[in-house]
Amino acid sequence: MRLTRYFLPILKETPAEASIASHRLMLRAGMIHQSSAGIYSWLPMGFKVLQRLEQIVHEEQQRAGHIPMLMPTLQSADLWRESGRYDDYGKEMLRITDRHGRDMLYGPTNEELITDIVRNSINSYKDLPKTLYHIQWKFRDEVRPRFGVMRGREFYMKDGYSFDVDEAGALHSYNRHLVSYLRTYERMGLKAIPMKADTGPIGGDHSHEFLVLAETGESEVFYDSRVLDMSLGDCVIDFDDVAQCQDIFDEFTTPYARTDETHDDAIFSDVPENRRMSARGIEVGQIFYFGTKYSESMGADVVMPDGSRKPIEMGSHGIGVSRLIGALIEANHDDKGIIWPESVAPFRVGLVNLRQGDEAADAACDSLYSGLVKAGLDPLYDDRDERAGAKFASMDLIGCPWRITVGPRGLKNGVVELTSRRTGETVELSPEDALARCVEIYADV
Ligand code: 5CA
């Protein structure tokens, strides 16, 4: 993309309403625009990051064997009356009446809708297990929407629903989700720690939240510092392998890690003192196993081999896709701006022309630009007629992981500069080598 043709409304001033870095930087970098409290338009660059995250979530969900679909945002109140949650959900639910006087609502989550779909189409134990998921907008009329996309009223969520014949199957589905979430967050360059959690309005007795440590996080967390050293890395996972998923579950959930809702001082005190940590965290996902809570009240059951009928065992599993962008920025920024991990960067390479209009600089930039496009590296070429300082400031704010700087002086010696946004390190290379180096960096991303 050439910057002169793009829509990137960068703000010079720090917006007064933003009290945390991610909110401030998303506004300043022209990623979002508030339309009303807790509701945002996703401007082109914000939308691009959202799509990158969505893509990773889709790939990892499908790798784990989960099936994508799409349910509507508007739901009939009748389904929620069946489960008993229509009244329980309270003021967080946005209630709407259509022209026929029918009660509708903007979905805060989809347990009822998916249970209705499944009870109408699945009749036999042979049709299970299944996990269906979608990535869709949700609405929760939060008392205090704040911190930009972090606690929005309208937000984007991956919600998946698992259906199993028995508890053992449902617990495998639960473990499979935990493992696939670990992979998902790692791919985004995030450390998200699974922590034992309360179930809240979703219900059930088995739940983990995934927390990214950040001073600005809304949750208070307590953990054994050992959790910080754990990662899946290149571990090859067979998601159908019950024992492997259980082992990974055990490995990642055995060290103490809890939010204040489930924190237990007596157990925590068994952790060696030098490893006992308390901090704040951002909840970027949560998984639940709640058995037959919805299937029983809504009549979703299957015929078993002996002819009896059994309510389906269910779980639901969410990832806060829009909130993740806030969490990513909280974990990856400095005083100049955002520092995107390579896997989620809206533009993978920034190209800065120090002297727009200089024949050699323009030609070198054009050629690098088309090389980067051809290599699929999604460059952002700052081709504005601006001072070098202003161009660097914009690139630092936007946070492309790598920047290639092209100027007449360097070109005289046959070189351009390649700079890492994270370390600030710069190397001089020929334009061809700079391109080759970028291709190499992104080969595994
Ligand atoms: N039905 C279940 C899982 S499918 C569910 O709704 N779970 S949840 O309530 O925990 O939400 C899933 C994730 O959505 C949370 O972990 C969080 O990352 C994100 N989320 C929840 N509320 C908001 C909000 N107001 N703004 C942004 N993200 C949110």
Image (cartoon, rainbow, N blue to C red):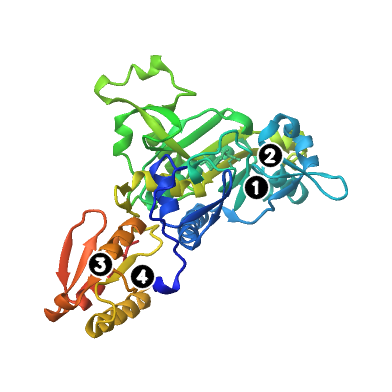
Q: Which residue is mark 2?
A: 312
**Residue 127, x across and y down, in percent:** 68, 50
User: Under tag 3, what secondary structure?
Assistant: helix
Ranked by sequence position, the earlier of labels 2 and 4 is 2
**Residue 428, x across and y down, in percent:** 15, 69
**Residue 174, x across and y down, in percent:** 53, 39
Can you tell me which quadrant of the image ligand 1 is in?
top right
Q: Are marks 2 and 1 in contact (CB under 8 Å)?
A: yes
Name the one closer to the observer, 219 or 263. 219
Measure the alpha-carbon separation of dots 4 and 1: 45 Å
Measure the alpha-carbon separation of dots 2 and 3: 62 Å
| Rendered-image quadrant of the N terminus | bottom left
Name the one closer to the observer, 192 or 346. 346
Residue type for callout 1: Leu
Image point (36%, 58%), residue name: 398
Residue type for callout 3: Ala
Q: Nearer the viewer, mark 3 or mark 4?
A: 3
| Rendered-image quadrant of the C terminus | bottom left
Q: Which residue is mark 4?
A: 379
Q: Quadrant of residue 290?
A: top right
Measure the alpha-carbon separation of dots 2 and 4: 49 Å
Residue that lies at the very extreme toward the left in this rendered image: 413
Measure the alpha-carbon separation of dots 2 and 1: 9 Å
Q: Nearer the viewer, mark 2 or mark 4?
A: 4
Residue type for callout 4: Pro
**Residue 331, x across and y down, in percent:** 35, 44
Image point (45%, 70%), residue name: 6
Q: Nearer the viewer, mark 1 or mark 3?
A: 3
Q: Residues within 10 Å of mark 3 (few under 14, many from 20)?
A: some
Circle number at residue 388: 3
